[in-house]
Image (spheres, helix red, strand yellow):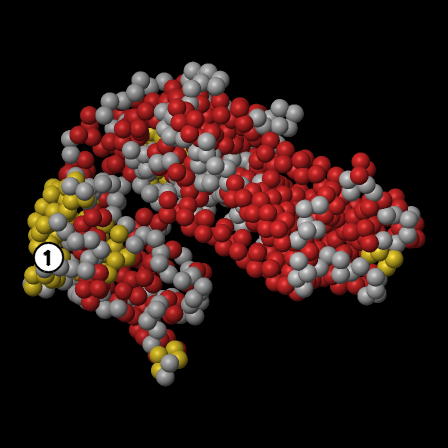
Amino acid sequence: MVKLRAGSKVQGSEDDSKKRRKIPDTAPLVAVLILMMVYFTFASEYFFQVENFKNILANAAVTGIVCIPSTFLIIAGQIDLSVGSAAAVSGMMLAQVVNAHGVPLGLLAVLVFGLAFGCFNGFIVTVIGVNALITTLGGLGFLYGVALLIGNGQTVGMNNFEWLGTAQPLNIPLPIVIFAVLAIIGAITLRFTKFGRSIYAIGSNPNAARVVGIRSNRVIFQTFILSAVASAFAGAVLTSQLSAGSPNSGLGLELQVVTAIVLGGASLAGGRGSIFGTVLGLLIVGILNNGLILMDVPTFWQRIAQGLMLILAVSFDSIRAKLNNTRS
Amino acid sequence: MSNTTELIRLERIKKSYNSVEVLHGVDLTVNAGEVVALLGENGAGKSTLVKILAGDISPTEGVIKINGTELSELDVYQARELGIRMIFQELNDAPSLTVAENIFLGQWPTSGGRVAWKELKEKAKAVLDRLEVDIPLDVEAGSLRVGERQLLEIARALIQNAKILVLDEPSAALSNVEVERLFKVMDQLKAQGVGMVYITHRLDEVNRVADRVQVLRDGNSVLNEGAKNVSREELVTAMLGHAAAQNSRPVVSKGTTRALEVKNLSDGEVYKNISFDVNQGEVVCLFGKIGSGTSEILESIFGLRGITSGDITINGDKFQPKSPQDSTSKKIGYLPADRQRLGSFAIRSVAENLSVASWARMAKAGFIRKMDEEAAYGTWAEALSISARRGPSQEIATLSGGNQQKVLLGRWFEAKVNVLLLVEPTRGVDVGARRDIYEIIRKQAKETNMAVLVATSDYEEVVLLADRALVVSRGEISAEFTDDLVQANKLIAASS
């Protein structure tokens, strides 16, 4: 064995001081966030209020729950567009089952649906070999149909299960607490576990990941399951908030999720991204929506702003990739 | 044969890059209906010379005469105009288009703005007939064998009126049958007055296909003779000079416990009937020219490539790898030749690239500490003298090729593998660092009882690295050398 000294001096470590002063990748996002908050504070007297921030976070939390595993997928070079429809189906199922059989069975139905649909996506992508974009685009389409089918096209009211969406332990809405816990678990998983690190490796170079013995297909399969279960759970939270399952409740969720993640610095080419970045992206999207509402901007303008924001975020991603190529 | 018409003449060609002269006044003449075999080791100047011929780069000094007229300058467009065409080893076709379309790629005949399919097919048929090859016109090019696709490229060159063909190692990826077919086509072209420059590493081809042979060494033309007048030994000596004999051999030790045993292995395509073994602590090199099958044998042992028959035994146990995961869990490591595609995680840090194969061992209760990764990197950065200016968190893609290779090598040392498979371990590594790498591979092997199997096309590497050398030629083991018999000239003679 060549002499092993744990923590032996690394070549070039004299530059460490420089390294520490390096500006983190997320710095521009924090700057944008602060600028937006300053602007909206002056633009609307209702913006800088505790209740309003609670409101922003509560709205962002449901999207955020879906964002955590979706961030995993995008870092692994995959994507899940079916999240909105999966949430809608889950919400419809919850309303029907809770009304007929009570809350525990309703939640079980949500979990089973999430697991089953995740396995379906994972199977099509890793075993059959269809690319994730097409697979989940198909899922987005057919599950929306299933959501309409369950309620015969109608909204289904739900009784006696409001607490999941509306409870406020310590005066904080429960969805925010759930999201915060999931985000922390997600961040730790991604950074410090073999599973999380494998996700970065797979996204960075799937072929090399295979050569070093990472079970890429298994990891991707598991991540699709996480994504579907999170979507189903988000659907349950939404239904609980509204006290009704609506087939349209998940419309456009995938757009918000992908926008937040890409805005947060994840690369659609894979290998790059973080939960912290995603949370920042989520806040930017949430504050923009909230600010526009407070300024009485009509809702269709919000849609336009959101779509443009995604294109902007992806453009930044491409420009960064080009800059990196020319540098090396 | 008439070889009176001189098509092209390069005189006293010199070429410098950044004031380093790589060609020191080389002549090259090609006559109509003549095949000139151009030989030389890697870095001898063959590619530079043919790039000048194709107008890709211009010489620093020297004269270019085409059909007797001296040119002040030759650029790519002029070269094409004059009928100079290059055929590379890598294919430049469109696999999803048909054979006929590929022959006319980008220059489809049209009538009234639409592709004139009838004319296209007739002309394609005519040119294939001219080459006396029988390939169906309507199948997709991608469904053909490599050799056939290469013939399509020649056909395309002919459609574009080629008078001089430069073939850059076309036979490297071909089977014996396909090579013979290529030679028949070259005979046809010769009879039709096309002049050819044929670059090859295979000495036995010289006699078969060439009229004249020219050898380059270190930017000089050291031999230019009729192909029938030179022996194989003369060619080897001309290519190597005398310097090659001076590499000193390491102290050989072979070990006694068998770590890897391969018996009658065949993949049904590139190699067949391969049998050998590697002991613990022993470094065995499979030496062969690119395309000879050495790298494919290693791919099969690692589970990247299927086998049709034969057995692999690791430490006494039968081993049937179905995927790389089977191999890594058996403590087998694999360093691919294609670093970008199979080796490095370009946008991830050097520390992560180095420890990725050891995560399972490093994980404590499922968690991997960055500290452990950086410590592992620190150890190997020192042992392998990896220089990453910004330390363990620097992205690997920003390192030089040599440093990247060292990180990937360190990856498997850190993973403490029992069997290490290396394909072209010093490709892209500067000469100075190579000897360090050889030394460290040998030291690691001896100290940790690791069996090392190397596939390489670099004879010098074999001489400096191997305890034992096996020569692979066209998919079969053709010779074995041990101790001081591992010598450059012996290796090359046996591999050709």
Q: Is residue A116 visible?
A: no
Q: Is residue A253 left or right of residue B196?
A: right
Residue B91 visible in the shown view: yes
Chain letter, disc 1 residue: B
**Residue B290 spot, x, y in % from top left:** 33, 43
Residue in front for this viewpoint, A30 or A273: A30
Amino acid carrying mark 1 in the image: Ile
Above or below, B443 against A228 in this view is above
Of residues A216 and A96, which is closer to you in this image?
Answer: A96
In the displayed image of the protein, which residue is found farthest to the bottom? B112
Q: Residues within 10 Å of mark 1 (few under 14, many from 20)?
A: many
Q: Quadrant of the N terminus of chain B?
A: bottom left
Q: Assign a secondary structure to mark 1.
A: strand
Rendered location of residue B23, percent (x, y)? 14, 44
Q: Which residue is mark 1?
A: B64
Asked whether, in this view, residue A203 is left or right of residue B269, the answer is right
Q: How many marks?
A: 1
Q: Position of residue A316 (x, y in %)?
A: 49, 52
Q: Residue at x 33, y 19 (%)?
A: B252
* Residue A93 image offset from top left, x and y in percent: 83, 54
Up/down of A51 relative to B434, above or below:
below
Residue at (85, 44) in percent of width and height: A163
Residue at image location 44% in from the left, 21% down from the top: B379
Picture residue at 78% right of the left edge, 42% below the top: A173
Query: Where on the picture, by quarter, is residue B360?
Result: top right
Quarter of the picture holding the C terminus of chain B: top left
